[in-house]
Image (cartoon, rainbow, N blue to C red):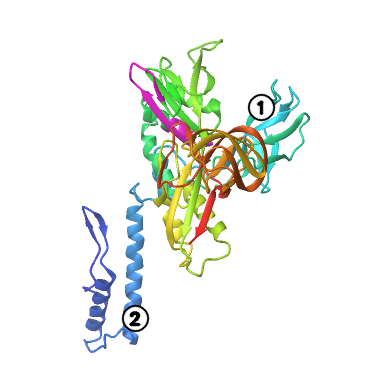
Amino acid sequence: MSGTTSVPQPTFTTAGFVAPSEPDVLTGVLADLQAAFGGKLNPALETPQGQLASSFTAIIGDKDAQFLALANGVDPAYAFGRMQDAIARIYFLSRKPAQPTTVTATCTGLVGAVIPTGAIAQSQDGNLYACTEGGTIGLGGTVDLPFANLVTGPIACAAHALSIIYQVVPGWDTIDNAADGVLGTDVESRAAFELRRSLSVSLNAVGSVGAVQAAVLNVPGVLDAHTVDNDSNSPVTLDGVTIGAHSLYVCAAGGDPQAIAQAIWTKKAPGCGTAGGTTETVVDNNSGYALPYPTYTVKFQTAIPQTFVFLVTLADTGAVPGDVQTLVSDAIITAFSGADGGSRARIGSSVYASRFYYGVSNLGLWSEIVSIQMGASTAPDASFTASIATTVMTVSAVASGTLAVGQTIMGAGLPDGVQIISLGTGAGGTGTYNLNLPQTISSEAMVAVIPNDSVVTVGVAHVPVISSANITVAIV
């Protein structure tokens, strides 16, 4: 097929590279074959010449698709893989490697005992966690320390699951995590990397909120960050944190506290006030100074876990597999952490139930969703005081709301997944309630959450967390 051809050619327009449709290519190839063989060929695709035309069309289509991928690869909105890495390198960025799940655990033992960085604890599912910032057990016999899973990725660590001392340290007796761990991540996804690249445009700036957030997100180990600048003359309170007048607020999940404080300080003038429950001292060892170097106090908020509960209701199609609970839980956690390539649940964001429909519905033809509903620990349906003996919870006082069957109970010492399954003497207020999991808990403050929302707002001082125990699957 030398000389002219009837096959339509790709074009470059204001929309970029535009490839012809394969039906048009096939028509052109058939015309070229007819011209080459005198116009007497049977054009039916099941003939030898039809099969040859189909093969030529597929080859041309594949060539056009490869060129289209190359053309899209220079556009940050569509680039992925090696091409996206190349674009990011212009901004002196590299894709973040997979990050481990992090959890804050309370270590108890002998006063003055030192728990070193690298000390190992084990969760009930067999995962090992290393202490990332050692500490000393205080006068109260406890110290709260951060631990990170030795395996990267979104591996859930439920509340009270980190309970085994794997590596003996003299004076260290017990370990327990009061809240779910913050899910780790796989290697930074295309969407997450592009978001960080777009934010990094501010990385070279100084003083702006965007510059601070970009710098904090660039700190190794930081899973998420949120920044707010109160430029008014009066303090404001957001999600329980008071931000002074003309002060900067940063909430961060993961990462070394000193590195986070350093990142904030390098992007905001020292005269600006900062807010949050974590305080670090930053040393200005600029070459223009001699010892002793000036020091500055930087405050920020270490993100508090906001525990999510899910209720996924599926139709009884007759083909629902026996492991549906595991399949659905894995799909929810995958989407929640952004491991499916989409956006993860983030600090200060709105989490929509519709975000999880795709992953659950793709589990199989049997997965017909009736509804997906959510709830969170920061907006409980009831706040109360109670004790638990085996599977009976005795409520002595109700501060707000009404207790009901199906609610998940949360409190100090309670694992994930504890639910009210039936009423005892209580009918929404004081009295007894029957639980699904046996516990022994002295009288304490608790909250009850039922998943009945299609959208949940994450507080600006909180990081969203989830575990499979707080995901319920109902078949109707």
The residues colored magenta run 214-237
Residue in the image at 47% along x and 26% along y:
263
**In the rendered structure, are the residues bearing label 2 and label 1 in contact, judged by CB atoms less than 8 Å apart?**
no
Q: Is residue 301 left or right of residue 28?
A: right
- Of residue 351 and residue 378, the one placed in the foreground of this image is 378
In the depicted view, which residue is nearer to us: 238 or 22?
238
Task: Give the secondary structure at mark 2.
Answer: helix
Q: Which residue is mark 1?
A: 143
> If the image is split into quadrants, where does the N terminus sit?
bottom left
Q: Quadrant of residue 211?
A: top left
Q: Report the Cα–Cα distance between label 2 and label 1.
A: 74 Å
Residue type for callout 2: Leu
Q: Which mark is residue 52?
A: 2
**176 is higher (above) or lower (below) than 354:** above
264 versus 457 height, above or below: above
Q: Residue at 24% x, 72% y: name it.
A: 24
Name the front one of labels 2 and 1.
1
* Foreground pick, 6 / 248: 248
Other residues around mark 1 within 10 Å, as few (<14) / some (14–19) / many (≥20): many
Is 230 colored magenta in this rendering? yes
